Amino acid sequence: MKKHSCDVLVVGSGAGGLASAVSAAHRRLDVLVVEKEPVFGGTTARSGGWMWVPCNGPAKRAGVEDSPEKARTYLEHETGAFFDPARVDAFLEAGPKAVEFFEEKTSLQFDLGPTFADYHPDAPGGMPGGRSIVARPFDGRELGKEIRRLRPPLAEITFLGMMIGSGKELLHFFRVTKSPISAFYVAKLFIKFLKDMAFHGRPMRLVNGNALVARLAKSCFDMNVPIWTRAGVRELLRDERGIVTGAIVDTAEGPVEVTARKGVVLAAGGFPQDAVRRKELFPHSPSGHEHVSPAPPGNTGDGLRLGAAAGAAIKDDLPNNAAWVPVSRPPRRDGTLGVFPHFVDRSKPGVIAVTRSGKRFVNEADSYHDFCQAMRKACQAEGGEICAYFIADHKTLRKYGLGFVKPAPVPYRGLIRSGYLFEGKSLRELAEKIGADGAQLERTVATFNEHARKGEDPEFHKGSTSYNRSLGDPEHQPNPCVAPVENGPFYAVKLVIGDLGTFAGLKTDENARVLDEAGRPIAGLYAAGNDALSIMGGNYPGGGITLGPAITFGYIAARHMAGANT
């Protein structure tokens, strides 16, 4: 068997793994990253790329007033009985330092989401903005030939393959037919996209999670950190004292025994594609197959299995063992179904959600995690399939789009023919097509419209928080999230529950060390990202609460392996 030695072996190439690698390499440790799929980037490369880090440098420079104490109060409120003070304090202490390190020492640069509010901004310690940052757009040409191994973005959230940044950039796309400035902005991006496709065969202007991974990978390559792809870990190696000393890695050239002198970091992306564990832990998925995840197919829980085989404890009793998001299933050209996560359309005026009872069940503009919890509760009370439908009229559909349906002037009739988008001349006809109670749907819409004409929603208070309003239409007043549903034809898109990553995971301490069942650190073994138990206690406090801790605990793991205090 071939042999390879290094100081640090990182298993997985998403944000947690690459942040660990970059941080360790900066401390002059010899690092190897292994990834079982043919491309690197993991779920991060498909994500929105936001990172929730209180008191981050970009926020301070923008004059945002925050404090670790305020953020701790918020997390204690959000996590309840699952509050982990040691790890939360470690995150709040190291998070700003990690951001500063990446800004000053690597290719990773950040932009602030100043109005990207916490998801429960009115809770104790909540903020109307300033805790979420995103990687700055990146020119993929800087990766050279390695761009071929970068995982592409999730196709369903691109426009013809072109990545669209969130925030102000997304607003330009919504206003493309109404604003000359927006039309020029979008045209310029689209021309660049067409040139990239002609000369490079893929977009080179990278945004969101793709930019985050690309910037971290560029930093790895600049520090001579190799990323082996098609290299899955078969098993961890331990010595007679139980210390983890490396792993057997299956590569295209055969197995390699990798010795890691300082430690192994498990960052393989959690278990969103493990149907067996989903069956055990996802209450809406009794067979394990009702759940739909936009995560890559390789995220099958390898890190948890490797850790458990080495004696690690797995904690899976959280109120929610994953971050839920409503998804729809647009058809692909090859006949399979895609996965479209609904982040933005929920907040738009003129969009409501109902179950097959024909009743609303939630403030649609609340967080996707809260939306799905309410959907599961309502459907279980009613019986039958756990699903819901977005409802909109023709004006709303053409102005904002709905899920995979794009706003005017992009055609949409093909999505009706494919079965993705349901259409009815009346609400009663639409209800018949989606299998809903038609009379109740008419009553629901009539009641909603009575108040919506005044910008009000007394039943669920859509548009009542800064988070709600941040994703609404600022030009629609008095409530950017509320408008009546009144002019047919009417449309519907079916929603089921998906995820943005798993929360259950390996128990770790404040230094990212993996713990055994007795709570003792397993020497030589660390975890970051979704392989580690989330510090959020099964809740979803703000945009980027997966990736913020991922890069922070990756930084912490490297700091500990290097024997440093800062």
Image (cartoon, helix red, strand yellow):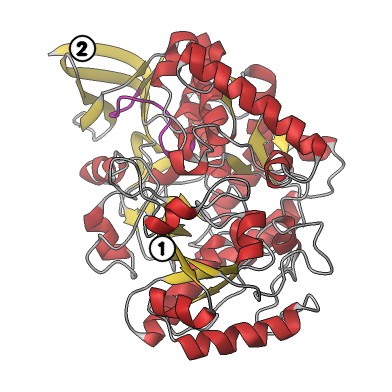
User: Would residue 355 be visible to someone looking at this image?
Assistant: no
Camera-side residue of 69 and 462: 462
Q: Is residue 354 above or below residue 49?
A: below
Residue 155: percent from left, percent from top: 44, 38
How far is disc 2 from disc 1 in space, using C-alphas? 44 Å
Which residue is found at the position 51% from the left and 43% from the top? 157
Which kind of residue does numbered mark 1 sit on?
Answer: Ile
Quarter of the image for the C terminus: give it. Answer: top right
Give the prevailing secondary structure in the magenta stretch: loop
Span of residues in magenta: 34-44
Residue 188: percent from left, percent from top: 70, 25
**Residue located beneath label 1 in the image:** 497
Camera-side residue of 149 and 281: 149
Camera-side residue of 318 and 121: 121
Which kind of residue does numbered mark 2 sit on?
Answer: Lys
* For residue 216, side relative to residue 313 (left or right): right
The quadrant holding residue 254 is: top left
* For residue 320, side relative to residue 242 (left or right): right
Q: Is residue 246 magenta?
A: no
Instruction: Tell me the SS state at disc 2.
Output: strand
Quarter of the image for the N terminus: give it. Answer: top left
| N-terminal label among 2 and 1 | 2
Q: Is residue 106 above or below residue 498?
A: above
**Residue located beneath label 2 in the image:** 3
Q: Is residue 52 above or below residue 381?
A: above
